[in-house]
């Protein structure tokens, strides 16, 4: 009788051990996928923030009366942007700034350096985003006819 009970317990232990190994192997696959998901979500949100920042710069520049005040307004928008542990640096690319491009529009470009929260092997720890936006010039009044 004792031997039957012993065999039954050893069979249950073998199944419990197999379940534990399956859980550990499954977690070795699921944890990196979850960490990659965190990185992807961070990249999507940072790209959206950079796009919004660039559009705000273009709107501010489009409301200015001339190119100099337009660039100053756009730079001020970038300077007011709050950096974080994820968004390390933002900048305004003055070489790409165009005021009244012949079509009555302002073109701005912003740059954002983003730190990834989880750096997996084979990935870079930082990603650089560029955004370009165009808005119609509204700060210049038309002379009366």
Image: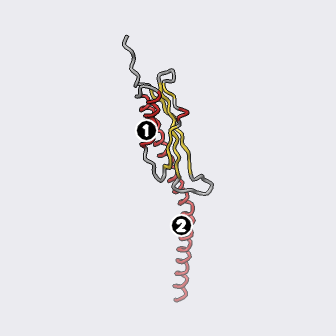
The quarter of the picture where residue 63 lies is: top left
Question: Which-is-in-front pick, marks 2 and 1?
Answer: 1
Label 1 packing within 10 angstroms: few (<14), some (14-19), many (20+): some
As drawn, the residue found furthest toward the front would be 68
Does the rendering let one see residue 41?
Answer: no
Mark 1, secondary structure of its residue: helix
Q: Earlier in the sequence, mark 2 or mark 1?
A: 2
Q: Judge whether 52 appears above or below 15 on screen.
A: above
CA distance separating discs 2 and 1: 53 Å
Which one is nearer the viewer's eye here, 85 or 51? 85
Whether residue 140 sits left or right of residue 122 in the image: it is left
Residue 16, image x, y percentages:
52, 74
Whether residue 90 sits left or right of residue 65 in the image: it is right
Find disc 1 in the rendering and name its residue: 76
Label 2 packing within 10 angstroms: few (<14), some (14-19), many (20+): few
Find disc 2 in the rendering and name its residue: 23
């Amino acid at each position: 009788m004792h031997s039957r009970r012993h065999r039954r317990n050893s069979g249950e232990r073998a199944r419990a051990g197999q379940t534990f190994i399956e859980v550990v192997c499954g977690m070795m696959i699921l944890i990196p996928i979850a960490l990659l998901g965190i990185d992807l979500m961070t990249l999507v949100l940072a790209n959206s923030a950079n796009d919004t920042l660039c559009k705000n710069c273009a709107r501010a520049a489009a409301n200015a009366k001339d190119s100099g005040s337009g660039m100053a307004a756009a730079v001020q928008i970038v300077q007011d942007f709050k950096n974080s542990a994820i968004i390390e640096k933002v900048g305004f690319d003055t070489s790409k700034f165009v005021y009244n491009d012949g079509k009555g529009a302002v073109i701005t470009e912003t740059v954002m350096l983003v730190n990834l929260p989880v750096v997996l092997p084979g990935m870079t720890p930082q990603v650089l985003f560029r955004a370009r936006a165009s808005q119609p010039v509204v700060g210049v009044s038309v002379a009366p006819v």
